[in-house]
Amino acid sequence: MLDRVSAPLQRLGRQVVNAIWRLGYASRFFLFVLLRSGTGFRRFQLIIKEIYFTGVLSLIIIIVSGLFVGMVLALQGYETLQKYGSSEAVGTLVALSLVRELGPVVAALLFASRAGSAMTAEIGLMKATEQISAMEMMAVDPIARVIGPRFWGGLISMPLLAAMFSAVGVFGGYLIAVVLIGVDEGAFWSQMQNAVDFRDDIVNGIIKSVVFGVAVTAIALFEGYDAPPTAEGVSHATTRTVVTSSLAILGLDFVLTAFMFRGA
Amino acid sequence: MERTVLDLWVGLFVAAGIAALLVLALKVGNASTTFNVGETYHVIGEFDNIGGLKVRAPVKSSGVVVGRVDKIQFDNERFRARVVMNIDKRYQFPRDTSASILTSGLLGEQYIGLEAGGDSENLKDGGRFKLTQSAVVLEKLIGQFLYNKAAEGDGKK
């Protein structure tokens, strides 16, 4: 009888302790990456390679999604704004939603599933095939050689991708609103420029995307580094990367938005 | 370290990213006007009610933006709102210029409208508008209208 009660409780307790343990390990890992990967800048070629992998190769998905998100925003926004006779404000709507929220968030979500999962799988597989242990054996610090460049590469790519997403999205909105529907072009741009503030909207959007970049790459790298060295372990870790980083992006976005746009 | 094809692609990527940022800043946002303020001088206006006026709201004269609202404070001695405005040095106004809080459109943002007076001397840095007009509070206006209508009705009986 007692067993039936205590066994689930024990399991729950073990899970909680495990989760805290992992959190501590992850924090230490993150700190190590920050401390030791500074040397990575001496071998900038490695970072360039990672920027190519995470940034350049994500370009197509980012540009295409940005274009479509902008176009959909313009269509939907026009539908509603037209009822109030202020269809010119569609430019403001598209630009503000993209620059403040959708640009950083959607670009980060795409980045997590496109580049984050690949990073986890790659590092998990390197560990499973004992390449990481081999490096340690040769006195090469795997954190400086493998993890660091990927971290900085992702960190540099993310804000650039988000900015491109927003810019392409605004262009998509322009295509729909001005070219297709026929909203006045001058009003479209001037209302947008009046409403979008450089410091409050654009810089805050960039800050958001930098934070998301840190979160996604750190989670992806940790999941890969921590993955059990089996095929199953790597596959689980890849899934966890996408799930955890998506949740982290959305959660962080709420916190950042609450700080940045307190209805001032 | 040799140059590789990778470098070219990464270079293009970074250039495109920076270009996107510039487009956002200059074409989408108002960085072009934010940075292009030039020299300004402060002028203070005191209002009974500022309505929904916000910091960085435009200060316009004849519809042209001549400055921005810098600070909004509450003067605890006179119990009035104290609005500090930054006005572009290129635009000088006579000392008896009046400032009123206006609304662009029916539901638009509020801004400060300046109407130049006839004084031969100009406002100095730190000067103060002698004549100010508060924001129109729609509720008060409607209330007044209803009150007047009711009074008219009484008169006719």
Image (cartoon, rainbow, N blue to C red):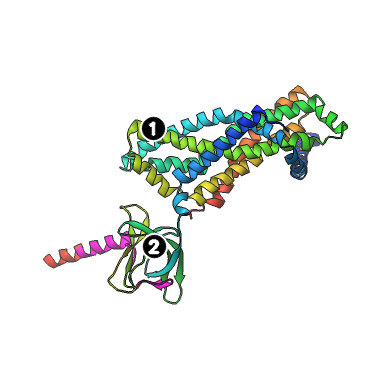
Give the image location of residue A146, x and y in percent: 76, 33
Q: Is residue B137 magenta?
A: yes
Name the side, left or right, on which A141 lies relative to B81: right
Q: Which residue is situated farthest in the left direction here? A: B156
Mark 2 chain: B
Does residue B87 appear left or right of residue A148 in this picture?
left
Q: Where does the C terminus of chain B fall, quadrant-wise? A: bottom left
Tell me if residue A216 can be seen.
no
Residue A117 drawn in magenta: no
The stretch in magenta equals: B122-148
**Residue A42 visible somewhere in the drawing:** yes
Q: Residues within 10 Å of mark 2 (few under 14, many from 20)?
A: few
Q: Quadrant of the N terminus of chain B?
A: top right
- Residue A53, position as x, y percentages in the image: 65, 29
Height in image: B99 above or below A260? below
Q: CA distance from mark 2 to mark 1?
A: 40 Å
Callout 2, which amino acid? Answer: Arg
Is B9 placed above or below A260 here?
above
Quadrant in which residue B27 is drawn: top left
Residues at circles 2 and 1 in contact by the CB criterion of under 8 Å: no
Residue A181, percent from left and from top = 33, 32
* The label number, if any, that marks residue B90 in the structure image: 2
Badge 2 marks a residue whose secondary structure is loop
Q: Residue at x 33, y 52 (%)?
A: B107
Q: Amino acid at mark 1?
A: Ile
Checking the image for residue A176, the label placed there is 1
Res A85 label: none
